[in-house]
């Protein structure tokens, strides 16, 4: 089964859990009338809506390429994450409004002990579901699934904090703490929404994934043969769970087409071994020029024009340049 279908099935499970937990939190709020528990329930509303949006986006992302979408439909995941982040932000501000209203018009709290138990069950379920979601997202490079997992985990920690606040209210009988706890975790929810929204915008704008680039550079430096004189003009574009990597590889100019293609195949094999099917590599082979001699340590070169001086270690910065590397003379 391909990664897109695994992501889709995982999101089905996450969405089903979100619906059940939302119902449980609504029951807890109805029994207790706690605005802090209402805070948790409102965030779960976002979980449910965002879950269905992510489900649809992953369904779209799992579609095969076609004439109108030669790179696939993976960008739909970024739009899903953007909507989810926006909904989380809105939920945070709604919670602050409800908490302030509770300060102005306080109301009686009921059956806090039972409410704490119900909310505690949802926290445990969210943590397990969020951890599984993030594990699958990391394996398949799914932003939509990662957003869902992080959202569930943030919901877990906010629920734990709310439970602590409810226990404090239960012990001290200070009703004003209900609104204070709600506002505190509303700010945490707003921060979570910002991070999700920031990640989605980065994907839409094709922002470079520096963590992936660094991992790729370390692997290539470790397995770099002498025929790989230079690597430059590396570009990464993410489409859902797939990374498309373009780069230029400089090899000795006298290699035949078949020999040069063999070097490209070797580079592709190293990248695929490291990242699996999540990376598509497009490599353009460049023949070396006279100035390349100074950074080429190939010992048996019969056409060398200048002596070898220094090998250039590849870094994120220098492989991203448009021009080939050379030493200043």
Image: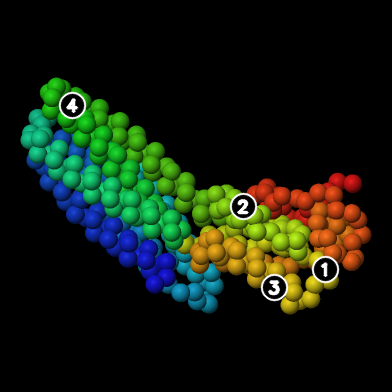
Q: Is residue 90 visible?
A: no
Circle 4 residue: 168
The vertical placement of 181 against 9, above or below, is above
Along the line of sight, which residue is nearer the eye, 122 or 103?
122
Residue at 80% x, 72% y: name it.
255
**What quarter of the picture does the N terminus occupy?**
bottom left
Q: Of circles 2 and 4, which is in front?
A: 2
User: Horizontal and vertical percent for residue 182?
Assistant: 25, 33
Q: Of circles 3 and 1, which is in front?
A: 3
Mark 3 is surrounded, within 10 Å at the Cα level, by few (under 14), some (14 to 19) or many (20 or more) other residues, namely few
User: Horizontal and vertical percent for residue 329?
Assistant: 89, 46
Residue at 84% x, 71% y: name it.
254
Q: Earlier in the sequence, mark 4 or mark 1?
A: 4
Q: Of circles 4 and 3, which is in front?
A: 3
Residue at 14% x, 43% y: name it.
118
Circle 3 residue: 262
Q: Earlier in the sequence, mark 3 or mark 1?
A: 1
Circle 1 residue: 253
């Amino acid at each position: 089964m391909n990664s897109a279908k695994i992501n889709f099935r995982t999101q089905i499970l996450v969405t089903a859990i979100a619906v059940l937990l939302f119902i449980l939190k609504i029951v807890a709020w109805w029994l207790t009338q706690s605005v802090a528990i209402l805070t948790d329930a409102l965030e779960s509303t976002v979980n449910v809506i965002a879950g269905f949006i992510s489900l649809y986006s992953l369904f779209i992302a799992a579609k095969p390429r076609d004439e109108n979408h030669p790179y696939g439909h993976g960008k739909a995941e970024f739009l899903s994450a953007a909507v989810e982040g926006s909904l989380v932000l809105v939920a945070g501000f709604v919670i602050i409004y409800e908490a302030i209203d509770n300060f102005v018009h306080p109301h009686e709290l009921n059956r806090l002990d039972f409410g704490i138990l119900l909310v505690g069950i949802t926290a445990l379920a969210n943590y397990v579901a969020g951890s599984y979601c993030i594990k699958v997202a990391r394996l398949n490079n799914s932003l939509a699934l990662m957003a869902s997992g992080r959202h569930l985990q943030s919901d877990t920690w906010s629920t734990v904090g709310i439970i602590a606040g409810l226990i404090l209210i239960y012990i001290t009988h200070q009703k004003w703490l209900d609104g204070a706890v709600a506002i505190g975790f509303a700010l945490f929810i707003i921060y979570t929404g910002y991070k999700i929204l920031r990640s989605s915008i980065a994907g839409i704008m094709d922002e470079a994934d520096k963590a992936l680039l660094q991992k790729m550079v370390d692997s290539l430096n470790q397995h770099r043969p002498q025929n790989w004189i230079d690597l430059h003009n590396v570009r990464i574009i993410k489409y859902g769970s797939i990374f498309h990597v373009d780069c230029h590889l400089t090899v000795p100019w006298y290699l035949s087409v078949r020999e040069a293609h063999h070097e490209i195949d070797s580079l592709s094999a190293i990248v695929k071994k490291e990242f699996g099917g999540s990376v598509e590599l497009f490599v353009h082979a460049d023949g070396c020029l006279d100035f390349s001699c100074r950074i080429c340590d190939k010992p048996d070169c019969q056409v060398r024009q200048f002596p070898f001086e220094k090998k250039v270690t590849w870094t994120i910065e220098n492989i991203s340049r448009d021009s080939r590397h050379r030493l200043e003379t």
